[in-house]
Amino acid sequence: MTELLPVTPSIDQLGRIIANVAAPAFLLGAVAAFISLLMVRINRVIDRSQFIHSIPESDSSKSFLRADLPRLRHRAALLNRALFCAIVSAILTALIIIVAFISAFLHFAHEYGVALLFIAALLMFCASLIDLAREARIALHDNDLRA
C-alpha cells in the first residue's frame, strides 16, 4: 500500500523550518536597519547639496563651498549603489525564508537553493558595506565643519 504524502507539513516539520530560517530572519532585520542608516546618510548628502545650491553667487563668504559639490555627487553615487545592494540583499534574504516554507509544503529538499540564496545575499550585503566604507572615507571634510 502506497502512503500518500500529507498535504501540509507537520508541526515538527514547521518547527524545523522556523529554526532554519531564524538566521536569515535576523539578517533581514539587520539589513533593514542598515537600509535605514543608508537613507539617513543619503538625505544628509542631499540636504547639504541643496544648501550649497541655495547660496547666492554674491555671497563670497560661503562661495568656497561650491567646490564641494563634486565630492557630494560622488558620495551620493556610492550611497545609492550601497542602498541598491542592500535592498537586493534584503530581497534575497526574504526569498530564503519563502523558499524554505514553500519547500516544506511541497516536500522537496531546499538546502542547495537556500544556501545559494544566502551566499548571494551576503555577497550583496558585503558589496553594500564596501560602498559605505568608501563613502565614509570621503564623508568628513573641513567644509562640513564650517557651514
Image (spheres, rainbow, N blue to C red):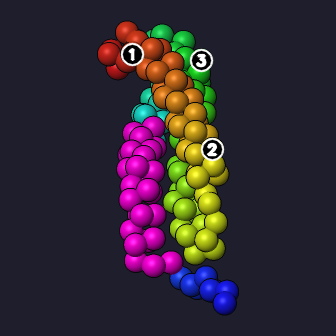
First in sequence: mark 1 or mark 3? 3
Quarter that holds the C terminus: top left
From the image, tell me which residue sits under label 1.
140
Q: Amino acid at mark 1?
A: Leu
User: Is 98 in front, or is 69?
Assistant: 98
First in sequence: mark 3 or mark 2? 3
Q: Amino acid at mark 2?
A: Leu
Q: Is residue 14 something one can see in this rendering? A: yes
First in sequence: mark 1 or mark 2? 2
Q: CA distance from mark 3 to mark 2?
A: 38 Å
Magenta stretch, residue numbers: 9-38
Q: Residues within 10 Å of mark 3 (few under 14, many from 20)?
A: few
Quarter that holds the N terminus: bottom right
User: Is 10 in front, or is 50?
Assistant: 10
Identify the secondary structure beneath mark 3: helix
Name the residue rendered at 54%, 62% in the picture. Answer: 100
Say which of marks 1 and 3 sits in front.
1
Say which of marks 3 and 2 sits in front.
2
